[in-house]
Image: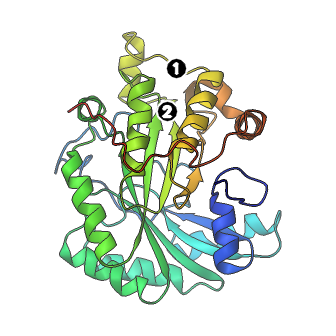
């Protein structure tokens, strides 16, 4: 049975937040100055091969400033377009549980104390959630609505090695269980267009997630950015960009495969124009989003219509 989510045929983040908080809620993307074990040599020094120099926080605040200053600067920019609303303190750049507990507590506390903040979002890696971090997240989730974002990207273990993800699928599964044991919502990042993956691989990742105890999904298009290790694969002819129509078709199919209780936080991503090598059509983000909406409407597609709770994906491991 089809559900109604305002003007969308999927359970959008905007709909979820309005439903939960009763008004418009905006993300304030922060850079707390952390690093990543996949960059500092703990796991690897290369990082994930697609990740930018700013640790996927290209649109976050300036790490040279305090959390307080970053928050105010971004809030001021937002208020020039939208006058009213509440805020999510979103720790976006790098790995936001990769620091001593006292440092994490201080940064999170500084953020949630800001006026108008109704939620805390923490982006991290599944292998950076030890017992102390889990306890800290619970401490904050008892005070304010909190979700944790995990960068899975793909359920294909072969692809995970190619992109230098640095952990196995079992680590991700354990992280989800531990976060759910403290009743914290889990949002998972996926990327379409990774090197070596075909349509089946990408949709298998969605099928895999559709059977996990997660509460949100982000679907990103792979962006090739200057200065990333992925450039070498592209120059060697080992990376082919998805065409716009291919991506729209994949995303709409993915939407139909996800159960209706999973919130779709994102259907494509942003890339800095000055760093983007391709695909260049991705710069017209609203055209892509509108095309996805049009395809869903024109073909009478909606979230959950092809979800089968008894059907598991076939993972290539």
Q: Quadrant of residue 99?
A: bottom left
Query: Which residue appears at 80% of the width and 76% of the height?
Result: 84
- Of residues 78 and 191, the one nearer the viewer is 191
- Of residues 148 and 315, the one nearer the viewer is 315
Give residue 263's position: percent from left, percent from top: 55, 59
Quadrant position of the C terminus in the picture: top left
Residue 57 vs 276, above or below: the answer is below
Look at mark 2 in the image and give the residue it sits on: 222
Look at mark 1 in the image and give the residue it sits on: 241
Give residue 266's position: percent from left, percent from top: 58, 50
Q: Is residue 52 visible?
A: no
Residues at marks 1 and 2 touching, judged by CB atoms closer than 8 Å = yes
Asked which colour scheme the image uses, the reply is: rainbow
Give residue 130's position: percent from left, percent from top: 20, 69
Cα gap from disc 1 to disc 2, whole angstroms: 8 Å
Q: Is residue 242 visible?
A: yes
Query: Which residue appears at 26% of the width and 36% of the height?
Result: 164
Numbered-mark total:
2
- Of residues 240 and 186, the one nearer the viewer is 186
Query: Which residue appears at 42% of the width and 54% of the height?
Result: 188
- Residue lying at the far bottom of the rendered structure: 143
């Amino acid at each position: 049975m089809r559900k109604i989510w305002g003007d969308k045929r999927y359970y959008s983040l905007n709909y979820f937040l309005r439903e939960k908080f009763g008004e418009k809620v905006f993300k304030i993307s922060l850079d707390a100055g952390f690093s990543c074990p996949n960059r500092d040599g703990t796991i690897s020094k290369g990082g994930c091969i697609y990740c930018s120099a700013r640790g996927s926080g290209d649109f976050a605040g300036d790490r040279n400033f305090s959390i307080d200053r970053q928050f105010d600067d971004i809030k001021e920019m937002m208020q020039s377009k939208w006058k009213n609303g509440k805020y999510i303190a979103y720790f976006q750049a790098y790995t936001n549980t990769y620091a001593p507990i006292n440092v994490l507590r201080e940064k999170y506390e500084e953020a949630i104390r800001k006026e108008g903040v109704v939620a805390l979002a923490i982006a991290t890696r599944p292998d950076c959630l030890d017992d102390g971090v889990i306890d800290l997240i619970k401490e904050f989730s008892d005070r304010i609505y909190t979700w944790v974002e995990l960068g899975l990207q793909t359920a294909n273990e072969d692809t995970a090695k190619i992109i230098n993800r640095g952990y196995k699928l079992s680590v991700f599964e354990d992280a989800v269980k531990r976060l759910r044991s403290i009743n914290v919502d889990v949002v998972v990042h996926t990327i379409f267009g990774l090197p070596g993956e075909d349509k089946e691989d990408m949709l298998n990742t969605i099928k895999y997630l559709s059977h996990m105890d997660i509460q949100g999904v982000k679907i990103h298009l792979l962006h090739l950015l200057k200065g990333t290790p992925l450039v070498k694969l592209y120059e060697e002819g080992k990376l082919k960009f998805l065409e716009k129509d291919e991506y729209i078709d994949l995303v709409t199919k993915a939407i139909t495969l996800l159960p209706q209780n999973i919130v779709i936080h994102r259907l494509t991503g942003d890339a800095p124009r000055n760093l983007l090598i391709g695909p260049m059509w991705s710069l017209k983000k609203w055209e892509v989003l509108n095309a996805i909406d049009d395809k869903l409407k024109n073909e009478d597609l909606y979230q959950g219509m092809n979800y089968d709770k008894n059907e598991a994906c076939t993972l290539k491991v």
